[in-house]
Amino acid sequence: MAASKLLVLSTCIALIFTKISADASLDVEDKEEVPRSDGFVESSILKNELNQLKSEIHVLELRIDENMQELKGKDEIIAKKEKLIKEKSDNIALLQSEISSLQKKGTSDAQEQVGKAHAWAVELEKQLEKLKIEIQVKNKEIEALEVRTNDAEKKVLELNSKLGSVSSLIVRVL
């Protein structure tokens, strides 16, 4: 904003000096001299130039005022846009923070679930080992029972054969 004000001001000053130097180069012979009451001689051309310069200065001052008002309006628009940009930037930063927080939470939740799953897997492996041992024990018990059953069947057969022998002996004896 300061640069644009400086540009407008320097342009106006350059125009004023250009006009003054151009008007000063007029022939001095064309000037009419008018005597004044205070003893000075006044030229009507100089008087006209002075009036013209005053009117040009006034026009330039009006233009400067208009430009200043326009610059103030633009500055207000820029300030509003900067405020809006800051609000949007703050909102973006907040959203990024929330995303980061959610990602960290998601990661920690996932890690927690992985930890639980791992613990559960370890527990299941322990239970599996216990079941394998129990199955081995049961298999040994079954084998022992089968051996006992076989032994019992053999004894039953022996006893049946002895019983048959004893029965036939009793039948003969009687």
Image (cartoon, helix red, strand yellow):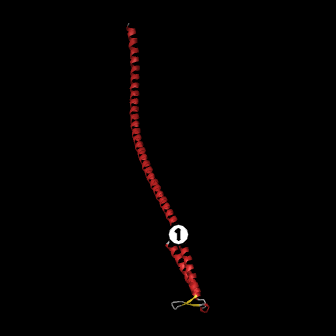
- Residue 17 in the image: above or below residue 162: below
- Residue 131 in the image: above or below residue 87: above
Given the current orientation, which residue lies at the most extreme right position? 30
Which one is nearer the viewer's eye here, 108 or 47? Answer: 47
At 45% from the left edge and 53% from the top edge, which residue is drawn?
98
- Residue 69 in the image: above or below residue 159: below
Q: Dividing the picture into quarters, in which one does residue 153 lie? A: top left
Numbered disc 1: secondary structure: helix
Which one is nearer the viewer's eye here, 126 or 98? Answer: 98
Report x, y in % for residue 72. 51, 68
The residue that mark 1 highlights is: 69
Report x, y in % for residue 82. 49, 63
Mark 1 residue type: Gln
Report x, y in % for residue 50. 56, 84
- Residue 63 in the image: above or below residue 105: below
Quadrant assignment for the C terminus: top left
